Each structure stands twice: as structure tokens, then as C-alpha cells.
Image: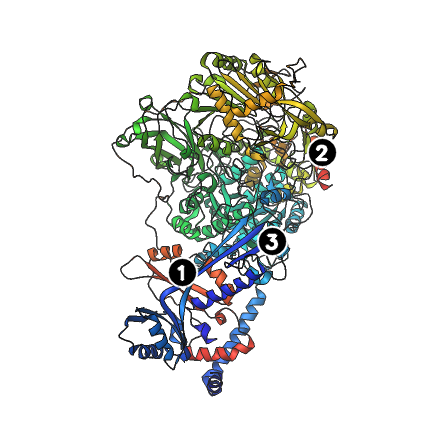
Amino acid sequence: MEVGLNARQIGFIRISILIICFVNASFGDRSNDAICAQELTSNHRVLVDYNSHVVKNEFIVTFNHLYKAAARKRFISSALDRNSDVISNWFILPRSNPASLHPSDFDVLQLSTNSLNQVVSALKRHPNIKSVTPQRLIVRTLKIVNSTQDEFNYRKEKSFQSWHSSRTLKSRQSLSWLNGFSFSGHSTSTTDTRRKLLRATPLQITAAHNADVLWGMGITGAGVKVAVFDTGLPKNHPHFKRVKERTNWTNEKTFDDGLGHGTFVSGVIASGRECLGFAPDAELHVYRVFTNNQVSYTSWFLDAFNYAILRRINVLNLSIGGPDFMDHPFVDKVWELTANNVIMVSAIGNDGPLYGTLNNPADQLDVIGVGGINFEDQIARFSSRGMTTWELPSGYGRVKPDIVTYGSSVRGSSIKGGCRTLSGTSVASPVVAGAVTLLMSGVLHMGNVINPASMKQALMASARRLPGVPIFEQGAGKLDLVRAYQILQSYKPQATLSPSYLDLTDCPYFWPYCTQPIYFGSMPVIVNVTILNGMGVTGTISGKPQWHPYIPQNGHFLDIAITYSDILWPWSGWMAVYISVSPEAANWEGIAQGHISLTVESPINGDNPEDKTQKSDIKLPLKVKVIPTPPRSKRILWDQYHNLRYPPGYFPRDNLHMKKDPLDWNGDHIHTNFREMYEHLRSSGYYVEVLGSPYTCFDAKQYGTLLIVDPEEEFFPEEITKLKNDFDSTGLSIIVFADWYNVSVMKKVKFYDENTRQWWSPDTGGANIPALNDLLSPWGIAFGDQVFEGEFKLGSTHDMYYASGSSIVKFPKEEILIHRDLNDQGREVVDAKTSKVKNVPILGLYKKKARIAVYGDSNCLDSAHIQKDCYWMLEALLQFTTTGIVPQVFKDEINQIDGNFAHQSNKEALPSRMDGNQLHRYSKVLENHLGTPTTRSLPSCPHLKWSTPIPLNESAPSNLYKSQKLLSINLPPLPPPVVPFRDQEQDSSKWLSVLETSSGQELDSEDEFSGELYEEVCEGAENTNEVECRWIWIPSWCYQMPEDQQFLDLISVIIVSQTLCT
Amino acid sequence: MTVVNIRWFMRLLRKRLVLAIIFCLSFTYFIVNVFRIRMPTNDDYDDGVDIDHIKTKLINLRRGQTFHNLQTANHIVDSEKKSDFVVDRKHDANESQFALDFKFDSLQKSETCRNSVQGKVLIADDKGYVCNRKDLTVGGCCDKSQPTTKLYSCDTCLEHGCCAIYEYCISCCMEPGKQPLLQKIISRSDHGAPLGGAASVDVLFASITDHFEFCLAKCRTSSQSVQHENSYRDPKAKHCYGEIILNPSPIVKTDDASKVHSHD
């Protein structure tokens, strides 16, 4: 007992960890090197790594009995006096905690000597000294290892049933992984002891974000109405203090949560017991909008949202999401809520690690979109990422998520009381919603200065950036609750930008911008910047944004064009920055810098006509790397314009085997699901540009190859003519990766969409083969409408997989055509019969003035459902198109096939467009004219208006990144934290650094081992900026009643210390 | 060590101070326990706003109550919502003259209004005015001296009571002449159809306290405004103060059908 009193017993606690670890290791597979491997679930393992080393010259001296500090010092000095010749210096490490007043039986001694053994034995000889042991420092790291099975299992868990299910996968879903990580579910008898090792799962998510600091100041969420739109909440759940209202908007007659999702989410926000939530005193409004089968409709949401506006909800959590950002009634309603001062927090989605997987409504400008990280500060594998795809094809996506926080293995309330562990961005979202609720209750006095924009600004400005993680994965960084509180307290209404600076040379944060420098003649690089306006729900940009090149830093080599929202509403808007290189810099290489300035203004209520607006000036620093224009052969143009995707239409997946994900919804952009392909092309020295307009809008002389992959759109007749002309006159080569197309299969893959309550049939196949055949007809090339699938080898080394592709049915005879034996997948889907087809032509190489390469399947380039990649083949084809030399791997094929060239360029009818297809609804090329689709008139090419530069003779610092600062009054000091034994004066700087040094997580794990509470207390050392922190032991009787046998002990302690609890 | 300890204890235990401390501790223990037991009950916070409560309220409300009574009932409901968080919330509390007061009231400078809060360009106040956002007074009212400010304006509204722009819908709905129509809607929803097809709509209207709030809520897009869930019935006139009379039957049917559907 008394040993426990002495707080700084680091050695003791750590050693006990080690012991448990070794015990586990003996069960585990690798006991040798002190690694504890622990099975979490079937597919996750926690690796606990230990290494311990002796702290040089530090010893723990243990005495026979308890002595006061003075006595202990006397003993040591008397023992050492006899050896004063070898000891140059010694001292006892001070223990400055209240326990140090009491007698203790050990000291930590620091020695400066060359003959340690002599000194140690001298110490040991002293009659009152029991033992002398070296001080050990143990370093522990812990990782969760994701096995590759991960995604597969997860997808399996998604709520899609079967092909003809009445429910579509792509409806709005609740975003958590309900059965994913529950420890109890997989527990064995040893789980209880093992769980203590899981530093990765802090006991309290609130502690991981230092919510106790705010609680200590009396901020607990009181006075804020927080709404949870989810699966409901059981009545009288023991964790919740203030359930103000439960409403049900579904067709099930219950308010209770049958799934546990809603309970968990509510718990993370407002639980007051066991697994704590952030804002236990907030007024909790529970809206049940999901049935127990996870069914939900937009119309339920609309009514529920209207009610939330009526009830004047302050913070609303939506741990839900779906890909349909074109559900206008829903999207408009979310805007309406934000406009009515409801702070919307939503989960970004669980479709990672693929890019282009953001979910609505988290991808909206006005919503706080939350991504998930694990307790190692790595982006969780499941967390959706990549730019928004609303703006494609002509624009560029916005940055999302806005912020990230813990979403992996977080503890929260379970339905029947008690706690459980869940993962998913569903979990991360309420962490932020809870934090927002808590923050808001701390600044209620600021009235309507706190609004959806200012809250988002404060969260983003205070977030901690994770090193080595791209902006399209982490946004502003990891939530920092206490810093956000500080910023919010001193907040002054203003407008800010996200990202707040553009350093396009900063890798990997500014991926993909940092991966490809810009050059004269390239398609303008577009950055889509989000404007947040904390001054008012509506605002405008006054005048025009200005471009200020820095003359000393070559800013004048850049041409900048800017487009922006006319009206910033609600609380937000966008600004697109187009960056190009001016002709003078065609052969220049270097870094160019400058900034863009703009003024945002908002109306204010008032009778004074002079003072009707507030204004806010913003500066956006810009830094770009410029290189000389690369040779034409190295430049590839990616056709984005002819890609169509869900939403709005049903464009079926490109791999018919992927029944769980029926839609093609990732944007088909080189920075979304073709990201890996892009990285490969870049690393082989190609420069890839994106064409977001018709073929009539690019200069073919600039590019070596046009890359057309999986196009769903029709082509304008002018485009077909232009391309043929480019091929003949300028030598532009073309590579086509087609996909499957078959009308019977298309009819077969229609399904009843429960979400929109109508039948959905696709308007094209994986690709629009009839349109593509029109485009390729001038060269006598055409694809057929049979669907093939199968594995084969190309060359001698390359394994290939054809995942639902078409075959080449027409190809000039004299050219190279490569065949393979494949399965007839069309028959398999339609008649459920399998049959092999021999010598299916899949790859054609055509060589005239320029080159054309066609391949029947795009799956091997598309990361969405890739099974075997074929980046090597793309490279080989590029080699062919740029040089005209047929790569060896294909040459080998020619010889092989020549003998049995069975498939003639035949006369069979080419595939035709499906009757009654609705493509014209979604097409930029077709329109419905009296019932028949006709081609629209060719749109004019985008014309950018370059800003008139206003040069400045100034320079920017080399590193543009500084933690984003909001304009504010001087930061007020935080009140001192409520910790016991606070005797030192606190100032804000001290406290801030305290927060940086204390992680909070350490506390939890240790706490479990000792069964006691420790508090970290820090104070600034004199004259330096350093902070000293130490652990203080809080006696258990201060927070819980002792057991009977401890009672007498306790009394004696109280008498000695003459105090109960401090 | 233990022997010493015990002897030392016995000596201490005999002292009065020690006894006093034991008493204190026991007392604390008692208090703590009592407190602990009380904690889990959340009844004292449960204002009974479970939907059952709302339903009862709704039934009482409809039993023989006219639209006028609805107006006067708002004192009770308003006092219930006490939060001075949002600015216009404060106005709620201050507001003593209520919505049916459609006369051109005394134009005081310090006049305060509730308004439609959300507008992009326009805003409507609880007196029935619609104006440009920048023409809002400190009190949140439309500045009547501005030429663009209009009273009971039905711009962009069609005959059947649906408008393109939310703020005009409110202003139009606020016109005293519309009162019988609104009353009809309220009483119709009593019988469940067609407006009250969904119980959810009932919940919404049950918590409405006066004419302005009714118009605010009625003009919003709702489950009644959509078809196939993800598209508007009429994108050009989606804000309706009146009943949606145009082809009301398909809505109800699809609604019911789908609900049955999702059951199986």
C-alpha cells in the first residue's frame, strides 16, 4: 500500500506491463524478441513491440523500511561518503508530489562516476538499504496490422443483398462497421487480461481529445441542442442524462434502436457514464430515420430535417452517407439546415482506401465532413477520400474530408448499457459532433458569432496536420478540441479559405499537384478552393479576386484565372484558381510565387445605410514549380469529357462479377479511381493532362497520345472528324480501353431501387461501344457486343485478367491483332451457362501516320475493382504509339497467332444502341428532340479570362505552411486545468505546451494496470520555455469508496497526511 | 512492519479525532451512495417530448379547436422553449403581440420580428413583408421604407399555392385572406389525408404555434414535394403554402405501396 503512495514509480508500472507481455508472448508466436502478437479479430492483429534499456547512471535504491526523505538522504550520503574519492557527483531525483511528504522505501539516485560497481556495492553494504537496481526505461509501440482481407470482409458486411435486391447498395447508408471490431464478439477467456494491452483503444475517446480540460472549466455541453439522425435510442438508457426528445420518422412503430448504431453514436456525443461522450449535459434529440434493416428514404429525412429546423437544433450529426450528391431535395435541405444555423457534421464514408469515394452529405461545402484515423494517427483504411466529383468533367474537385479524428476501435455505448468498440467514419463523425457541441456550450455567450461557418473555421484552423498524409485524405488534419476552444473564444467574424495556402511543391500534402510540375502549353491546373464566411449566411466577393505575382520570385511567369461563386450561400462558396505558365517561361525552370487577394462582404442588419456590410480580406499565397515544356511524345491527354458516372444515371460497373457495387461512381478521373495508373505513368516519365471539354478544344500538336478509357458518353460528329484529322495531319496517336456492352446483359442488370422506388436499367454497358465504334469507324475498327471474361497470359510473364470486356470485331487485316481463349460472360449472366470461346481478339495495334491501340477491357487500369493490373501493358502500348515500334512482348504474340488467324474482319452487324435508352437525360452530347435523341450543337470551348496581374516587389517565405491563423483578438488565457495539487501560477503559454506534451492515452493504459488514477501535471521551468511534467497519483479513495480491508490502512494514511483528498 | 503498524493503529483508534474522522468518512460514503443511486434516472429531464406526448398534444389541439385557438396556445409552447442561443430566439420570448395581428402596426423603430433566417437574397418577416436581405433592420424586420420591400407578395407563386421562391411563399401565405385555406389544411390533416398522409407531418404541425411558424414550416420542401425520393415533383414550384392538389393521389399510393414493400 505505502509503496503505491510514492508516485514516481515508473519502473514498477512499466515492469508489470512487461510481465503481462511476456505472458502473452508465450501464447503468441514470437516470444523470442519480446513481441506480443495479439489477435483482435480474424483479420486484425495488434503488434506490441517492446524494447527496454537501462538508464545510464540511474539507480533505484530500495530501503528496508519506510523513511522520510531526509532520513533516506542521510543513509545514502553516509553510504557514499566512504567512496567520495570515486564519486564526483550524486543526487536524488526529486519527487515533487504530495506523496513525497510521506515516508517511502525507495529513491532514484543519479550518479556521476566511473566505477559504478564499487559505488553500488558500497550502497548495498549500508544496513538500511535493501537493494540497488538500475533504472530501466521501457519504450513501447503498438500497431494495428490490417490484413488484405480487410476490405473484402468489410464490403461483405455492407447491406447489399443480391442482384435483384429491392434495396440498392448505393442508397444512403449508416456508416459504421457494425460487427467489425467488437472485442466481446470475438473474445476468448483470455480477453480480459489481454484487453489491457490495447493502448490502441483508449478507455475514453474523450480523454484522447482532452475533453476533461473543458469539463474542468465547467463546460459540459449544457444549453446546446444536439440532434442525432440515426437508428434511434432505447428508452431510459443508463448512459444518458438529458434525452430531450425522441422522434420516429420511419415506417416502423418504435423509437428504440434495434441495431446499436444510433445508441453508439449518441453515446460518443453525450454519454455520461462508463464510456463517456463529449457533451454529457447537452440536450439530446434523437431522430430515428433508419429502420432496423437500415432502410431510409429522402422523404423521411426531409420531414425530420424540417422538424429539426423548427426545434432550433444547434448541432446535427449525420453518421450516414451515400454517393448520390444529385439527390437535389436532400442536398437543398441540408443547405437549408445550415442556413438556419444548424451545424451539420457528417461522416465522409467507408469506401476507402480508393480515391473518389466521398459520400454525400459530408462532401458539401457547408457540412463538416469527417474522416477516420486510428490511434496511431494514420488514416483509417476504410475512410473515404479523394476530391469531390461534382465538378467533373470541366472543373476540379474540392478538398475533403475537412477534418479527421479517431474512427477506428472507439469505445461507445451499446444498446443494453455497457460499452462496445466500433470502427467506421460513423464513429469519427460523432466525435466531431460531440466536440462541436461541447465547444458551443463553452461559447454560448458569443451568440450568433458562433455559426456553422465559424465553427468549421475554428475546427480547421486548430486541427493538427498529420505528417506525410495528402490533403485529400486528411483535410486540415486531426481535431484538436482544446485549441479549437481557444480559437473560438477569441473568434472575430471573418472569411477564410480552405486550403488556406497553395504550395503546389509541398509533397505529399499537396498530392496530386506536387506530383507534376506545370509548363507552358499545358491544360491549366485547377485548384478548387472553398470559401468559408463566418460573417453571415449570405455574402459576396466584392470586386474581383486579384493576382499579385511576386517579381523577385518569378511570379510573373504565371498566368492566373479565377472563377468563383456569385453568392456565398449558405456560409460558404468556392473559388477556382486556374494556373498556367506564360509563353515567356516556355523554356524556364524554377519556382514561381505570388498571392491572390480577395474581399468577402456580408450584409449586416442595421438602420444605418452607411454601415450595411462587413468585410473580410483574405490572402491566398501561391507557390508553383514550372518546368520547360516536355517533348510531345511524353505528353498524354486523358479524356475526362466522355466519362459519365453515377449520379445522375445508372452507369453499371465495369466488372460484372462485382455484384456488391453495381454502380460506376468514382468519377473515372486520374486523381480518383485511376490514381494508381496516373502514378505509374508519372513514374515512367509521362506527363498526364486532363481534357474536360470536347475533342475540338485541344491542340493535337501538343500531345503524343490521347487516352480514351471506358467512355460512356456519345461523341459529337465534329469530334469524330477532328480526331481523324488530328491523326492524319498532326500524328496524334490514340489508345482506347473499351469495356463490355451487350443489350441483353444490360436488361438483365436492371434492378428495383428501393431508394428511389423505381426500376433502374442502365443506359449503356460498361462503356458506350456503339458510340466508340462511331468514333473509330474512319479507321475500320469496331468492338462487338459479346461479353468476355477470363484469365490468360500475355508474353511469357504477364498474367492478365479480362473482367467483363468486349472483343474487337473489325480491324484492318494487315494490322496486328492479338487473340485469347475466354469465357462468354454474357451468356453466363443471361442464361447462366458457361461456355468457352476460342481466339477472341482483344488487343489491336494499328500503325499508319500515327498509331492506334485498342484493348477490350478497362478493368486492369481502374483501381475500383482491379484484379490484375496491366500498367505494364499501358506502358508498352504508349511505347508503341509514341515510337511506332511494336514492343517485343506483342511481337512474340504475332508469330504465335499467325497460324490460326480465325477471326476475320467480318461483316456481322455491329452492336446498336439499346432501344428506348435514356442516355440523353445525362448526356452532354444528346438531347431529346420529340422523342428521338438528337445531337446537340457543339458547345463552345472554355475560355479563361486571365486576371490582370498586379505585381508586387515582395517575397514569400520558403515555407508557406504555418498553422492557419484566424484573425482574432489576443488569445485569452485558458483557465487553469482542474487538476489536484495545483500550486503553480498558470499562464496560457504554459498550458498550451502542456497539451502538446501530454497525450492522454498513456494515462489510460497505465491506469488500467495499477487500478489507480494518475494525473499528469506540468509546470514551466524557470527562464526557459520547457515544461516539466510528472505523474501524480490520485489515491483511489478520492473517487471511490475503499473496500473494507483497506479501510483501516486508509485511516492511518489520512491521519498521517492530515488531509482527505486534495 | 505490520506489527508496528497495527500497534500504532490501535493507539490511534482510541483518539477522539480518529473517531470523528471515521464518522466523517462513513457519512461521506452514505452521501456518495445516495447520489449514485439517483444518477441514472433521467426522468427529471425527460420533458415527455416523446412522440406519444406530441400525439396527445395534437389530439387535444384538434379537438374542437379552431385556427384562432392555435394562435393563443403559443404562449404556453413558447415559454417551454427557453434558449437564448440564436438571436431570433430571443425575439420569441419578447414577442407578445402575435401573428394574427395583421394590421399595419405602429411602426416603432425598436420593432422586432422573427424572420425566415435562411435566405440567399431575400428574407420574409413575421409581419408578412418580404425584402432584400440587406434591407433588414436591427430588429430583424424588413425595412418598409425600401421600395423593394413588399407585403403579402405572391411573386413566383402559382394558382394552386406553390411558389418557386421560399420567401415569397411565406409572404403570400401570411396574407390574412389565406386564413380560411390554412384552416382548412389544418382541419384536413386532422383526418389523416391527404396532407397528413405521413405521421411525420402531424408531428411537425403539432409543434407549430402560430401563423408565421405555420407558413415557415408549410412552405418548406417536405416529403410531399418529392417523387422517386430524389427529385422534385415540380422543381419550378416546390414551395407550397396550399395543399398540393395537383395529382395528390399518386403520392399517397406510391407512399403506401413502398411502405408495404419495404416491410417484406
**Residues tagged 2 and 1 counted as in contact (Cβ below 8 A):** no
| Quarter of the view holding residue B67 | top right
Residue nearest the viewer, comparing A468 with A879? A879
- State which tag comes first along the sequence, 1 or 3: 3
Give the label on residue A977, or none.
1
- Mark 3 lies on a secondary structure that is loop
What chain is tagged by disc 1?
A: A
Q: Is residue B252 visible?
A: yes
- Front residue of A47 and A510: A47
Disc on res. A182: 3
* Lateral position of residue A448 relative to residue A819, left or right: left
Chain under callout 3: A
Residue under pointer 2:
B253
Spatial distance from mark 3 to mark 2, Cα to Cα? 42 Å
Number of residues whose C-alpha sits closer than 10 Å to that of mark 1, classed few (under 14), some (14–19) or many (20 or more): some
Relative depth, front residue between A838 and B6: A838
Mark drawn on residue B73: none
Report in which chain the residue with disc 2 lies: B
Judging from the image, what secondary structure is the residue with disc 1 in? loop
3 and 2 marks on the same chain: no
Amino acid at pointer 2: Lys
| Kind of residue at badge 1 | Pro
| Residues behind callouts 2 and 1 on a single chain | no
Q: Position of residue A773 (x, y in %)?
A: 59, 17
Mark 2: give few (<14), some (14-19) or many (20+) Cα within 10 Å: few
Quick check: A836 above or below A424?
Answer: above
